[in-house]
Image (cartoon, helix red, strand yellow):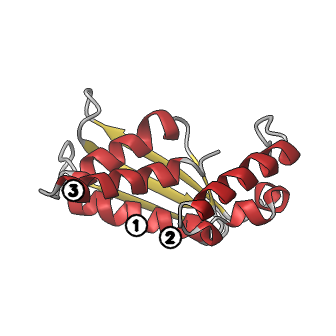
């Protein structure tokens, strides 16, 4: 697997500092497996999930989410019941939960445009199911945590 030009030593240093900052803020840095052994995490070719979403032209609605888990060779496709139907906020939230659980278990997420688009749209759509702004922010933060672990 190509490592996308990232230096394992530099990455470990950066993630170590992130880990320290999370600890100082009272966060759960122990869940960040990649900070414990960045080189091992980066080189593990089995714990990989490939993520892709399809949206409407505006990028405000999701028509499909596809995940491929490399170690099990399992592909999951979530889409509307009919072609062109959008996923519900609950369906999107369920997928965010699954992706976050995988990353908490040491999986890397690979997505063509994940940080710039996919995780942002997933977070925005899932957060709409909450009326309370703090709940909306929590969902967007969940998507941001996932995007920090994208390759």
Q: Are marks 1 and 2 in contact (CB under 8 Å)?
A: yes
State the separation of the CA atoms marked 3 and 2: 18 Å
Q: Earlier in the sequence, mark 1 or mark 3?
A: 3
| Residue ranking furthest to the left | 131
Residue in the picture at 66% in, 52% down: 18
State the separation of the CA atoms marked 1 and 2: 6 Å
Which residue in the protein does label 1 denote?
97
Residue 80 seen: no
Which residue in the protein does label 2 denote?
101
Estimate the x, y position of residue 121 in percent, counting from the top left.
Answer: 34, 41
Which residue in the protein does label 3 denote?
89
The quarter of the displayed image where residue 124 is located: top left
Q: Relative to the observer, which residue lies in front, 124 or 3?
A: 124
Estimate the x, y position of residue 145 in percent, counting from the top left.
Answer: 50, 54
Image quadrant in which the C terminus is located: top right
Number of labelled discs?
3
Estimate the x, y position of residue 25 in percent, counting from the top left.
Answer: 54, 60
Secondary structure beneath disc 1? helix
Mark 1, other Cα within 10 Å: few <14 / some 14–19 / many ≥20: some
Give left or right: position of 145 versus 31. left
């Amino acid at each position: 697997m190509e490592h996308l030009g990232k230096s394992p030593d530099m990455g470990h240093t950066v993630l170590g500092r992130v880990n320290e900052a999370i600890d100082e803020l009272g966060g759960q840095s122990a869940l960040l497996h990649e900070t414990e052994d960045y080189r091992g995490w980066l080189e593990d070719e089995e714990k990989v999930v490939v993520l892709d979403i399809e949206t409407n032209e505006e990028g405000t609605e999701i028509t499909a989410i596809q995940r491929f888990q490399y170690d099990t060779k399992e592909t999951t496709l979530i889409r509307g019941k009919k072609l062109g139907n959008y996923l519900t906020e609950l369906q999107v939230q369920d997928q965010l939960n699954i992706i976050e659980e995988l990353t908490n278990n040491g999986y890397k997420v690979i997505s063509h445009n994940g940080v710039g688009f996919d995780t942002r749209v997933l977070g925005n759509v899932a957060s709409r199911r909450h009326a309370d702004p703090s709940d909306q922010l929590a969902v967007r933060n969940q998507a941001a945590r996932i995007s920090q672990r994208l390759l």
